[in-house]
Amino acid sequence: MKKRSWRPLRKNIIEILKYTTVVPFKQEKRNYINSYKCFLCVRRYVKPSDLREHYRERHADRKIKDHWLWDQRRFVYLDITEMNCKYCAVVVENMDELVDHIIEKHGSKYDKSCEKCFMPYKLTDGTLTCFICGKEFNSFNPLATHTLDKHTSDKPHLCDLCGRRFVLQQSLACHVRSAHLNVEKHKCKFCGDTFRTEYRKTSHENKVHGEKTIKCTRCPELFASLTLRKCHLRSVHKEGRVECELCDKDFFNRSRFLSHMKTAHLKQRDVQCSQCNKCFPSKRHLKLHMETHSEERPHKCKVCKKGFRTRSNLRTHERIHSNDRRFACKSCDAAFVQSSSLKHHMSKHLRDEKR
């Protein structure tokens, strides 16, 4: 592989910071608290708005020197929430338009033939949203991983087991552990359940066993974390949900709403299966479909040892053993493990009504 030259990347970053108001930053996690670190000094901030204010007051007119960028190995993170040209009042929609503007109107020496050297984000003090697809995240790390994995074309790290590609080596390693190795070494200290990652174990302990001290603002229910309360407010009290103007449905977040619009109203099916040529509205639907082409059933039931292609199908099956009949008929006392069984049952009521 040809050795990458970092100097042109650094030169391009210097041009961007010279002509625009975007805010460069670093991200790190200390004592389990996510913080945004100023690119040019050691100051750290929990809120992106505080970082932007600091950068405007201390560094906005500071000349960026080449040697400050020597520790950069791939991308520079840029906060483009308040993105403008420093020299005129032009309005642009994205970084590509801004780069074209500073080259054409102000004579910037930005080299467009060089590979992209920055990752732009629109940062808010609350929930972070991917401005490309609308998916929401509680902190920056998963958003950055999502952007690199889903919205970056250069993915040099190939999984030999399934063919998926990743931008970062650590993303590939995490994928292999979770998708292909049946490793469940992270054990819950309360109930003994095991998990493939430390994050999933900690999430389980907080959600299931954590002390519930946070009260819902609209009912007496208590929660172990602010995230769980937020999910409760959205799912039970419909707070912050996105409504569809074309039908009476509402959705947990904008990402699910956009998926609904594409499948239900726009009828777009532009993602094609390479094996049978069927088309689907999204990569998520295609991924679920691809499992029908595989004979592997890696997810085993602990009770009857039956195998399933997906963890979701396994969880549905496990309801049979626990007698979890969550889908109840509104016309009689019948209840079912699966929603499909309820739909089949409801069709009998409809036939009886027509007689």
Image (tube, rainbow, N blue to C red):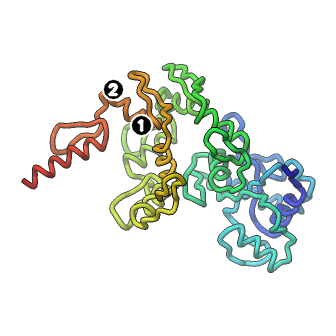
Q: Nearer the viewer, mark 2 or mark 1?
A: 1
Residue 65: percent from the left, percent from the top?
91, 58
Q: How far is disc 2 from disc 1 in space, using C-alphas?
A: 15 Å
- Say which mark, if any, is on residue 15: none
Chain-order first, disc 2 or disc 1: 1
Left or right of 263 on screen, residue 180: right
Q: How many marks?
A: 2
Along the line of sight, which residue is nearer the eye, 320 or 207? 320
Left or right of 208 on screen, residue 169: right
Location of residue 32 by image quarter: top right
**Label 1 crowding class (10 Å Cα cut-off): few <14, some 14-19, many 20+?**
few
- Say which mark, if any, is on residue 322: 2
Furthest-left residue in view? 355
Residue at 19% over, 49% down? 347
Left or right of 26 on screen, residue 162: left
User: Dot 1 corresponds to which residue?
Assistant: 313
